[in-house]
Image (spheres, grey):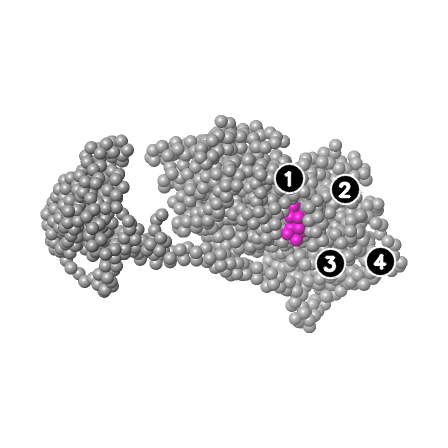
Amino acid sequence: MNMLDLVIALPAIGFLIALLIPRAMDNFIRLFALGFSLLTFVVSLTLVMGFQQGAAGQQFVTNVVWIQNPEIHYHVGIDGLSLWLIILSTFLTPIAILLSWNAIQDRAKEYFAFLLLLEFGLVGVFAAWDLFLFYVFWEVVLVPMYFLIGIWGHDRRIYAAVKFFLYTMAGSVLMLAAIIFLYTQAGTFDYASILDQFSTGKIVLTHLQETLLFLAFFLAFAIKVPLFPLHTWLPDAHVEAPTAGSLMLASVMLKMGTYGLVRFCLPMFPTAARENAPWIVILAIIGIVYGALVAMVQPNMKKLVAYSSVSHLGFVVLGIFTFTQAGLDGAVYQMLNHGISTGALFLLVGFLYERRHSLEISSYGGVATAAPWLSILFLITTLASIGLPTLNNFVGEFLVLQGAAQANFTWAVFASLGVILSACYMLWMYQRVFFGELSEEVKHHMPELSLREWACAVPLIFMMLWMGMYSQSFIPIVSEQNAKILHQGKMSSPVRAMAAVQGVNNAR
Amino acid sequence: MDPSQALEMLKNGVPTSWYLTLSALLFSIGVAGFMIRRNIITVFMCIELMLNAVNLSFIAFAHQHKQVSGHLFTFFVMVVAAAEAAVGLAIILTVFKNRSTLNIDEINTLKN
Amino acid sequence: MDLFFFSLFAFIALICAVNVVLQKHPISSALSLVGVMGSLAVLYLLLGAEFVAMAQVIVYAGAVMVLFIFVIMLLNAGIEEHRGRSWIAKLLGFPAFVALLGLLCWFVQRFFPNTGFVKFGDFTGGGAQEIGYALFTEYLLPFEVTSVLILIAIIGAIVLARKELD
Amino acid sequence: MYKLWLIPALPFIGFLINGIIGRKLPKAVTNLVAVGSVVLAFLWVLFVGNQSNWGATPLHAHYFTWIKSGAVNVGWDYWVDKLTMIMLMVVTGIGSLIHIYATGYMEHEEGYYRFFAYLNLFMFFMLNLVLAGNYLILFVGWEGVGLCSYLLIGFYFVKKSATTAGNKAFIVNRIGDFGFSLAMFLMFTTFGSLNFAKVFAAAPGKPEGILTAIAFLMLLGATGKSAQIPLYVWLPDAMEGPTPVSALIHAATMVTAGVYMCSRSSVIFLHAPMAMEAVALVGLATAVFAATIGLTQYDIKKVFAYSTVSQLGYMFLGVGVGAFSAGVWHLMTHAFFKALLFLGAGSVIHACHGEQDMRHMGGLRKYAPKTMAVLACASLAIAGFPGTSGFFSKDAILTAAYGHAPWMFWVGVVTAGMTAFYVWRAFWMTFWGEYKGHGHPHESPWSMLGPLVVLAILSLFGGVLFNVPKILEGMFPPLHEVEGEGMLMGISIAAGLLGIALSYYMYVVNTELPAKITAALGGLYRLVYDKYRVDEAYDAAVVTPLIEGSKAVLWHGVDQGVIDGAVNGVGYQARGIGGILKLIQSGNIRSYATWIAVGAVALLLALGAGGGVK
């Protein structure tokens, strides 16, 4: 039992206790959930304190047998890749709880319990080191989110929830099949052991097998990311979900996909990953440009942000499949950045919604006059989202594009178009929502931020600045882990150098 | 096999397959009854008929293999049939109270 | 002797079975069913299943059928109303039935061509002692389970019947 | 050592104070913070310059590692050499003056504190831009000033035209930044570093093709920020912002960032002759093009805006023909006189109660003589009147252009004539004739006039005081001596004087003439007056297709039609099949029994066919 187990267990315990609290004690449930999630966050910070940079392998490992036959372990541990994603989950859950404080009146108990369950699943996904355990957590995440959308969502919530569920299931079923196939080959679900068997040559896959396995994993993750053209569940799910649901969905759940790509696809199937990289990168770039263009014409704020997520996650996938240090670091960093800045966008859109009860851009205008601080926070978030230097997204985007330029300069050219377009859609929305004449309806529904709302937004804004100005607090351990992954894939630097030269030639 | 020879053989007793055939015939009659009758009680009786037909096979095989297990299966079937009859008839009573009919064509709440 | 008894009671059983299906009034069907069960009991005896034959008479022909008749009486079930059947049923019903019979007979004959012969007294393992022994050794668990099942059935029946009291 | 970080930090502190608690502060404190922080920065620049021999030996400072991943290692570095020093002086010096001016100009505006917070933020980013020790930090400033420009153009955010102009500025700049960032990526893959020192040291040895590509991409970036063809369209619209903003950001400092970057990257450009040629051509084309539009405009700020575009073209011409120091010189003198022109225009607008159309002005020499005097100085400078600051720098550029290609000189001279004409046209229309506006015009307060006087002095004597090519000697290749320099000088002076004289004739002596000329030109005049309808063309060619295409094809077509159609189609198919199978579930017990029987028979038949159970 170490701190990591505690971080995994606390939300689950909180979930169970929350279920036992009588329904009538509404406010106590809120306080309880907030307290528990904050406690989890504080405990998770000890992981950062105790994390040893430079140590080999994972840390905070617990490995006990969970199911005897077939042998499935409760094997958890963290490394540079998962540490920040776990912190991101524990960091955002209290915010999600706090922001739903007044918005959720109906069935508050279940709602907050589900948020805790969601946190449990998310932390578990990032910590799991046993493929089966990973799959279990992967599915655990699905359940609370399904209900969050399906019960507390807006008008078309059932459609959105079912679509979300089926899309994800379609992918994860393939992943399960792949996991079971690996089990038949390796005789274990333990990821470390499987990796070991790959590297020592105990498992030898045929080319076809490797490709199929890669694709099975890839598809599950790509749906979650979501990669174009598998993204259409995302706008619906976001629009229909309650604010906290959108926040958690965009900020952390989408990262499960990209995390999976880095964690499983690259180390296990390096050859297949490299062979398939060209078309994946093309899809990612299409996603970047396409998501931005479609975001531009959305009349609904949440849909706009959702499509912008498609665009931003395209950068992450692009970075991963450049197989360069910069690209991979940038991709992982961009996961965190997107979590913070898009989370903040959904949060602020949620604030607007609580005031005006509309998500349509056209029902706003002149908000800057009525609620200047809200507008300023929104502006900072907008700027972070469009990648202004000194704010977080820029660092990630820069590294990803730099990596892409090293791999193939043409990729960088097309992906950079997304940077232009992001300014178009975000600023255009900002103009229509915040600037202009203040209409009567807006005027009467637009109070300035409350203390609770400040408490939600300020940590996110703070993180944007910190991550934008001093990325050295975060990147080194990620970088270290990525170097290992690249090394495992035997993607030696000469290959990349050649690719870089090629890229330069292409540019000419 | 000419008739006289067959008659000679029958002195030894009846072939087990005849029992099985009888069982099959009874079973088929039960199935047919189940399908053509509308009165729920009669349908129920046809089910009993089918169970009995199966029981007969069990006993016949028990004799064939000189084992007692078949008897025990029959025994269990009887127990289950008795339990089923008790519960089933209670259900019929309830259904009749609620819907005032015994016609199974009208008891189609399962649809949709 | 065997042949005679078999033929007689098989014939009775078949006639009664057909009667069960064809009789319009449930009471007639029920009485015919008693006939089937009775004749089957005799056949069981022929097969050396003494205990089962007794149980058949007592449990089936006695208890279960009494229950049926009780219910028929209670509900005052009359002749079932007749409605036209679909032409497919009319056209295909009987031939299909005959085909089914034929199929089953053919099967029995095909798959069990050389079965032994049943002669009264050949098999004496069906007495109460043997049954009891098997029941309390090899089949103890299923036996206990059936007792639970019966209990559930009793409770179920009571619960269902109670409902109509409210 | 010299605490270089203090230079941008001071305005940043001002920004924080005014931005966070500015609403609760009295105006005097806001003024003090805003102006004080910039003036202190100016003083600190002077101190640093004084201590470090004005950048003769470059200063280098590394504060912390900003981005590090594998080979990518970018620090927060500052770098001060002579070029930086000039830029620092221009930015903080003129910045201070404009801040002082703004305290008077903005006195009665809403959101006073907000204005100064933005302005201080702008100073912070602009100083970062010029202090940067590597391209990425330069890019930080580059994007940051773009942000401030966006905020300040949209300062009157209730006005839709203002916020639209802000968006346009930001987005057009983003297109430039696209080029700049690609240049950086290519630079990194080529040199393995973004540090000025390392890049410039390594550049001469690299293949010309790559250097040309980098230079072209940088040029794209520069055309965005410095409003050159084809990305100049945002600058005229940017005049929606308050006038001090136009003066500071859209005339004196930010828009010159492109020129600064090109000069800074002179090593790369010098090794990419094709790119140099392109820079010169872009600059020259922009200079002529914008000057022709300037001839026809009536909005006083628009006239000066096109003049800015045109003058920036001059600077690019200078850079392109290899006269980097001349370009920087013109950058500086232009900062003096164009800031003065804008501030003077602001003073005029202030005097006329917010009127910007010159047709509703006139006769202001009686009401605002001091403003007239300073504006006359600026107008002389921009017209290249001998001895004024503009004369020296423009002449240096034109001479260098002649050395490069004589036709460029002639085009430049024609442009100079046009420049003199439209600036003086504005001057006459504003100050001569009868007042045609509303209300009573009045002179501006001293807080506004004070900075104007300082700038007027600089406009007149700045060229003599600061001989930039001399200061920058050694940094750039020397300016070539050209045969017959005196004659060239004479031609350009003549062109300027001719422009002034013509404008005097047309707008003071024979005021009927302009109308006749415009009538005679007809459609051509309309075309120029409508700014060659470039905005409309961009709208029709790029913006509308992009938006409509995204909406109709991508969103409704691909997303909702094809992808969701396929997804939902699968769902509907499943439901349809279920609908057929549902018929089996009729709820009729006997039909269920029939199905069971059929199934059993099928099983038996299968068994029979298969030979039975073994």
- Circle on res. D403: 4
Q: Residue at x 81, y 40 (%)?
A: D56
As drawn, the label of residue A487 is 1
Mark 3 = which residue?
A: D282
C-alpha distance separating marks 2 and 3? 28 Å
Q: Nearer the viewer, mark 4 or mark 2?
A: 2
Q: Which mark is residue D197?
A: 2
Please rate how many residues cluster around mark 2, counting C-alpha atoms within 10 Å: few if below 14, some from 14 to 19, many from 20. Answer: few
Left or right: where does residue C50 sit relative to residue A382? Answer: left
The residue under label 4 is which amino acid type?
A: Gly
Crowding at label 3, few (<14), some or many (≥20) Cα neighbours within 10 Å? many
- Residue A75 highlighted magenta (yes or no): no
Looking at marks 4 and 2 on the same chain, the residue that comes earlier in the sequence is marked by 2
Left or right: C50 with respect to D2? left
Give yes or no for contact between labels 4 and 2 (Cβ–Cβ under 8 Å): no
**Residue type at mark 3?**
Val
**Residue interval drawn in magenta:** A400-412
Query: Measured along the vertical axis of the image, is residue D592 above or below residue D9?
Result: below
Q: Secondary structure at mark 3?
A: helix
The residue nearer to you, when weighing A347 against D7, is A347
Q: Chain of mark 4?
A: D
